[in-house]
Image: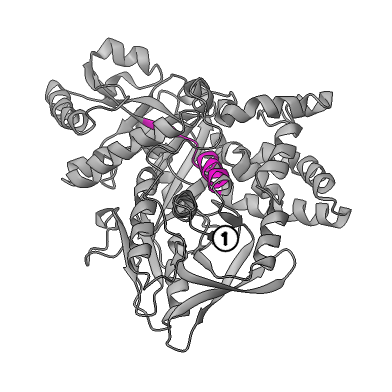
């Protein structure tokens, strides 16, 4: 997956693309993968980097959604549980089974949650995940040694999936590339093209690396811009009513000592009515999330002070050692593109189902949904796109959907992903790990960690640039590896060395290095908690 090669494909293209996808998050990349695997010519354009927005900022769960079951949304839960299994089947190096503890204070609570989770198990019949069961107080304290004793007289354990969101996204992008799709990051769409009949037949896009404008023709254009989908719709219809009521969710990252076991924990009822997770991830503990309505969306949202205080206070209620602002290694904030569904001011009540709309001029917009169901979202979107195509505009006779059984790039059934996602290994590279190690063997220093706090090596930086279309220090430290999300201070310290490695690979100058280090310093402020 090479950016220069894909850029040349766009420049040399003389025929319209079958589909142009706007947006390089989970939804857009899944659509490109689905379309290309059916034999369609598909181009994906992303204004920043793949997964820069919502798709890199999830709670790291592939799950049916226990709280959606409580809300009575059986269909969403059933579909998500099915997709959970397909994801694990197709990317076992990235998706694994994780047990979750619900601490209970009474026998009645244990009975209540046990009964509900049996329904969860029933809806997941036939999958490869564990089944729920009640546990005693002693077993609860054994499994979660840092929980306060007064918070539990036992509990219920159920099973869901855990993953690394942007590592899965990069795997999907490389799969789409291998299937024939053309993907470009830092290539923003600035306008839509229309024919004399007012039908959309392409886009205008700018390569931000060269500041070159491109006119790109297509039979169909799909708007998969996530929180920014309303801005794309306004290019089509300036007066279009907004589809989204966005909210943001915040997570804080703590040292592993606060939650050292091999099990996650869910607080089923917090002061704001949501659930809260404490999850082991890459040898750290992630606490989240919040649900705060916001008026404006941005590529780099920032946490609000009350959100941070809520997470710290809730964690303090349950953990033996009370975390403080000084303990937080990183904080990350994501925006949920929720589809407006009622007059409620509480975004927690809005739909997590996906919505597909086709405008009078033919712009296909898909939004909503969740990471777990992104494969099905893409299948539905490509189906509707093909159904809406008049006559024989798309010359290719597409195959049926292929993605239910399409193994993702790096597939490795023996990667031992449980110990690598919750722990500190590198099994998330899957079958690429052998080649990565060969690269690191070229120079002794390439296999050594760049900092004691994180496992990143120079070899991983070079790998990200050569094979995963990383273009900036942020791309490497935030998304090809997860350093910025795990330890902001340590990431800032190694940023100059990372910039130098990228400079050498891309044959850039020293001025670029300084610009990158400065930009990363500024970006890091969104991941730091002010000490009050």
Where, by quadrant of the figure, is residue 243 drawn? bottom left
Q: Residue at x 61, y 44 (%)?
A: 478
Instruction: Report the residue at 11% width, 25% height from top.
Output: 108
Q: Nearer the viewer, residue 248 or 383?
A: 383
- The secondary structure that dominates the magenta segment is helix
In screen coordinates, is 171 left or right of 13?
Answer: left
Relative side of 241 to 451, left or right: left
Q: Is residue 103 left or right of residue 35?
A: left
Taking the spot 75% from the left edge, 67% from the top edge, the residue there is 210
Note whether 375 is above or below 66 in the view shown: below
| Most foreground residue, 437 or 420 | 437
Q: Magenta part of the protein: which range?
A: 161-176
Task: Indicate whether 218 appears above or below 265.
Answer: below
Instruction: Name the secondary structure under disc 1.
Output: loop
- Return the residue nearer the eye: 486 or 116: 116
The answer to whether residue 531 is visible is no
Q: Which residue is mark 1?
A: 46
Residue at 28 percent of width and 65 percent of height: 340
Picture coordinates of residue 268 (x, y %)? 26, 36
Residue 399: x %, y % from top left: 40, 51
Residue 166, horizontal then vertical, whole percent: 53, 43
Within 10 Å of the Cα at label 1, are there few (<14), some (14-19), or many (20+) other Cα atoms?
A: many
* Residue 164 is one of the magenta-drawn residues: yes
Residue 453 lies in quadrant: top right
């Amino acid at each position: 997956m090479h950016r220069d090669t894909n850029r040349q494909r766009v420049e040399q293209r003389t025929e319209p693309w079958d589909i142009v996808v706007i947006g390089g998050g989970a939804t857009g990349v899944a659509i490109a993968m689905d379309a290309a695997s059916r034999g369609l010519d598909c181009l994906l354009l992303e204004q920043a980097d793949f997964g820069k927005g919502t798709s890199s900022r999830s709670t790291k769960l592939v799950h049916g959604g226990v709280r959606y079951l409580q809300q009575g949304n059986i269909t969403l839960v059933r579909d998500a549980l099915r997709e959970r299994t397909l994801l694990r089947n197709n990317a076992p190096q990235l998706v694994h089974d994780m047990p979750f503890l619900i601490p209970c204070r009474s026998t009645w609570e244990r009975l209540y949650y046990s009964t509900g989770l049996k329904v969860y198990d029933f809806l997941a019949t036939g999958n490869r995940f564990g089944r729920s069961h009640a546990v005693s107080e002693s077993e609860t304290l054994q499994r979660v040694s840092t929980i306060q004793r007064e918070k539990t007289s036992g509990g219920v354990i159920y099973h869901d999936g855990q993953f690394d969101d942007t590592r899965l996204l990069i795997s999907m992008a490389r799969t789409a590339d291998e299937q024939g799709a053309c993907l470009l990051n830092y290539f923003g769409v600035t306008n839509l093209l229309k024919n004399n009949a007012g039908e959309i037949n392409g886009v205008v896009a700018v390569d931000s690396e060269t500041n070159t404008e491109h006119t790109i023709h297509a039979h169909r254009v799909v708007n998969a811009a996530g929180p920014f989908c309303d801005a794309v719709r306004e290019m089509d219809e300036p007066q279009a009513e907004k589809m989204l009521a966005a909210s943001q969710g915040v997570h804080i990252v703590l040292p592993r000592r606060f939650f050292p076991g091999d099990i996650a924990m869910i607080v089923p009822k917090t002061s704001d009515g949501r659930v809260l997770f404490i999850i082991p991830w890459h040898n750290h503990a992630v606490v989240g999330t919040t649900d705060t309505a916001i008026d404006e969306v941005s590529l780099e949202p920032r946490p609000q002070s009350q959100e941070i205080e809520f997470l710290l206070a809730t964690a303090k209620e349950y953990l033996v050692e009370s975390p403080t602002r000084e303990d937080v290694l990183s904080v990350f904030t994501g925006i949920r593109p929720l589809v407006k569904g009622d007059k409620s001011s509480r975004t927690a009540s809005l739909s997590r189902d996906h919505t597909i709309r086709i405008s009078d001029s033919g712009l296909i917009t898909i939004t909503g949904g969740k990471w777990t169901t992104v494969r099905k979202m893409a299948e539905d979107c490509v189906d509707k796109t093909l159904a809406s195509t008049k006559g024989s505009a798309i010359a290719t006779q597409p195959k049926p959907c292929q993605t239910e059984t399409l193994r993702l790039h790096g597939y490795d059934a023996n990667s031992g992903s449980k110990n690598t996602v919750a722990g500190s290994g590198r099994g998330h590279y899957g079958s690429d790990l052998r080649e990565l190690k060969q690269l690191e063997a070229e120079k002794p220093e390439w296999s050594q960690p760049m900092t004691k706090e994180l496992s990143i090596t120079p070899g991983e930086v070079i790998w990200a640039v050569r094979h995963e279309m990383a273009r900036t220090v942020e791309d490497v430290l935030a998304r090809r590896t997860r350093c910025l999300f795990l330890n902001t201070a340590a990431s800032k310290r190694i940023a100059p060395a990372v910039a130098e490695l990228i400079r050498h690979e891309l044959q850039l100058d020293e001025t670029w290095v300084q610009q990158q280090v400065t930009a990363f310093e500024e970006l890091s402020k969104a991941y730091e908690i002010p000490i009050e």
